[in-house]
Image: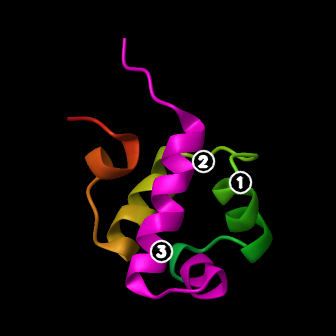
Amino acid sequence: MLEFNKELMEAKIKTARKEKGYTQECLSGLVGISNRTLNLMEKGKSGMKLETLIKFCNSLDVSPNYILRIN
């Protein structure tokens, strides 16, 4: 069974967002979620659907493996 650390996943999204130079407002607009939802996700207080994960990956130009920390 595949296991992952939700807090680490959210930290990877925040790191990738900052590396791209995106604000939370910019990234939330690209992904199609509210700024508040993104804020909660980055704090590890909100989960996400697979569809949202894919949108993050596309918007940040990273692989799901990077976000999920799968080698």
Asked if residue 7 lies left or right of residue 34, the reply is left
Where is residue 9 shown, x and y percent of the image?
49, 46
Q: Residues within 10 Å of mark 3 (few under 14, many from 20)?
A: some
Q: Label 2 neighbourhood size at 10 Å, few (<14), some (14-19), many (20+)?
A: few
In the rendered image, the quadrant that contains the C terminus is top left
Disc 3 versus disc 2: nearer the observer:
3
The alpha-carbon separation of the residues under discs 3 and 2 comes to 16 Å
Which residue was labeled with disc 3? 17
Tell me the kind of residue under disc 2.
Answer: Met
Q: Is residue 33 above or below residue 52?
A: below
Amino acid marked by disc 3: Arg
For image coordinates 41% across by 69% down, the residue present is 16
Query: Which residue bears the numbered disc 2?
Result: 48
In this view, 60 is above or below 23: above
| Disc 3 to disc 2: CB gap under 8 Å | no
Residue type, label 1: Lys
Asked where in the image residue 20 lies, by quadrant, the reply is bottom left
Q: Secondary structure at mark 1?
A: loop
- The local crowd at label 1, few if under 14, some if 14 to 19, many if 20 or more residues have their Cα within 10 Å, is some
Residue that numbered label 1 is attached to = 43
> Residue 3: x percent and y percent?
43, 21
Q: In front: 42, or 48? A: 42
> Tag 3's secondary structure?
helix
Question: What quarter of the picture does the N terminus occupy?
Answer: top left
Residue at screen point 66% across, 85% down:
25
Q: Magenta part of the protein: which range?
A: 1-29
Q: Which residue is found at the position 56% from the left and 51% from the top?
A: 10
